Amino acid sequence: MIVEAIRGDRTFEEIPGVAYINGDGRLVANHHKLWPQENLHLPARITTKRIHDEVKGMVWAEDSRGCDSNCTFCSRRGLRGSGFSGDMSPKRVADDLEQLNNMDIYKVSFTGDDFGGDPERTFRIADEIIQRGIRMEWSVSTRADHVFERKNTPEQNARLKEIMKHCAEAGLTRVFLGLESGSQSQLKRYGKQITVEENYKAIEVLREIDVDVVAGYMPIDYLMTVTELRETLEFLEKTGMGLKVSNPLSVLRVQAGSPYLKLMKNEGLLGEKTEDLVFYKAHFKDPRIELVAQLADKWVEDLYPLIFGLKGEVATVTLAKENQNSPARNVETTLHAFRRLELEFLKVLVGNLEVSESIDRDSVNTIRETFVEKRRQLLEGVKSQLLMGAYGDIQTSRLLNCLKEVSQYC
Ligand code: SF4
């Protein structure tokens, strides 16, 4: 449409979702329009084979867009202007997987914000994959209440389990759940509309049907108390999910367009927009949490290239069950070692800060130095392992590059 407008065959006013300068020199932004997914062509897949074969990268496929929920920290709905769209037919989803099979690709991750947004449709997708004999191991993201919902009857929850089981029979190997917290009051503030109990149950159901569970988690937010931080860490310990969350030191970012932004405004804690124009600076309600957040951010920043590299390798090599004992899987053991250390760091910090409302800076410094030294030793260990080639060829060369960027901490 833009090309047609430049040619003079149509006007810019007619094109949804573009911004342009009109004849009066004014900037005009047109409202966007959601494209019916049923009418989407299959992806061209021009670079997919190279990404898969040469770069050993992750291959993605599309199943749906959007999500019907309203989590306060999430801007997905606000920016998209709509909730879950599951109008892409199961046949079309399977067509794409078949296309990938024809390229000798048998592992894929789905992009949908909430794959399980329409559970009966999920069942039909799994059915289509099975009926057509498609050979694929796949992963999805969804909400815990599409696996177990507290308001459901036992029969309805049995059906949700049956749907996930059918997916597992069709090749589902991993589910990413947006758990976010193990503290009820924090979950409420996040607007998850999911209880801690539902989070527990969803993990249990998926484990029962032998599907790997990984999760999004935001243990630290601006309005939280030290007690909430302890509760949310205890959840990770009880479920063993501490090793499976995307970042146990994650600090919530106040996003433009999210309801959390209004919460912060009401509390008088909102600062300026950051340079990327996506997030806002903000102040913490409790100075002790602010200190934890600063230490967590610094830790994440120090290790970012290596942890990012490890997470990417883990997500790719562990999707296929047959990779269970491959050298590439050693990257998972390494990532877990960092996760254990980070969780221990947080736990010791919380234990110290919970004792009193005032901060004992000297003892916090001692804790930080102790853990930075432990981290240095761990990094030295990873370096030796990499030099011995313990991770497989591709992973070794990529991770050595990542390690170079954090070598000042070794
Ligand atoms: S965080 Fe996830 S579940 Fe919540 S609104 Fe956003 S996409 Fe939906």
Image (cartoon, rainbow, N blue to C red):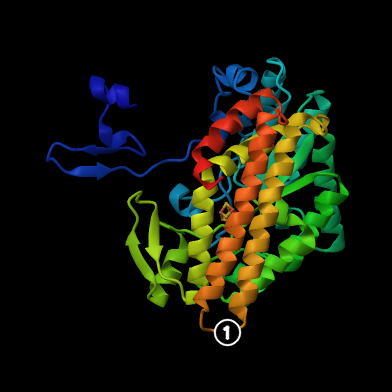
Ligand 1 falls in which quarter? bottom right
For the N terminus, the image quarter is top left
Q: In the rendered view, does 66 fall on the left or right side of 257?
A: right
Q: In the rendered view, does 74 fall on the left or right side of 97?
A: left
The structure residue drawn at horizontal position 42% and vertical position 76%, both measured from the top left corner, is 267
The structure residue drawn at horizontal position 55% and vertical position 29%, both measured from the top left corner, is 39
Note whether 10 is above or below 18 in the view shown.
above
| Residue sticking out furthest to the left | 24
Q: Is mark 1 within 8 Å of ligand 1?
A: no
Which of the two residues, 206 or 12, is positioned nearer the viewer here?
Answer: 206
Q: In the rendered view, does 86 fall on the left or right side of 285?
A: right
For the C terminus, the image quarter is top right
Residue at disc 1, secondary structure: loop
Q: Quadrant of residue 167?
A: top right
Percent across and percent down for residue 102 are 71, 15
- Residue 151 in view in this figure: no
Percent across and percent down for residue 286 are 49, 77
Note whether 78 is above or below 386 in the view shown.
below
Which of the two residues, 237 or 295, is positioned nearer the viewer here?
Answer: 295
Q: In the rendered view, does 359 fall on the left or right side of 99?
A: left
- Residue 242 in view in this figure: yes
The structure residue drawn at horizontal position 33% and vertical position 34%, both measured from the top left corner, is 15
Which of the two residues, 304 or 162, is positioned nearer the viewer here?
Answer: 304
Note whether 286 is above or below 176 in the view shown.
below
Q: Which residue is mark 1?
A: 356
Percent across and percent down for residue 126 are 78, 35
The structure residue drawn at horizontal position 70% and vertical position 43%, both measured from the top left corner, is 334
Number of residues whose C-alpha sits closer than 10 Å to that of mark 1, classed few (under 14), some (14–19) or many (20 or more):
few
Residue type (three-letter) at the residue carrying disc 1: Ser
Q: How many marks?
A: 1
Note whether 248 is above or below 28 in the view shown.
below
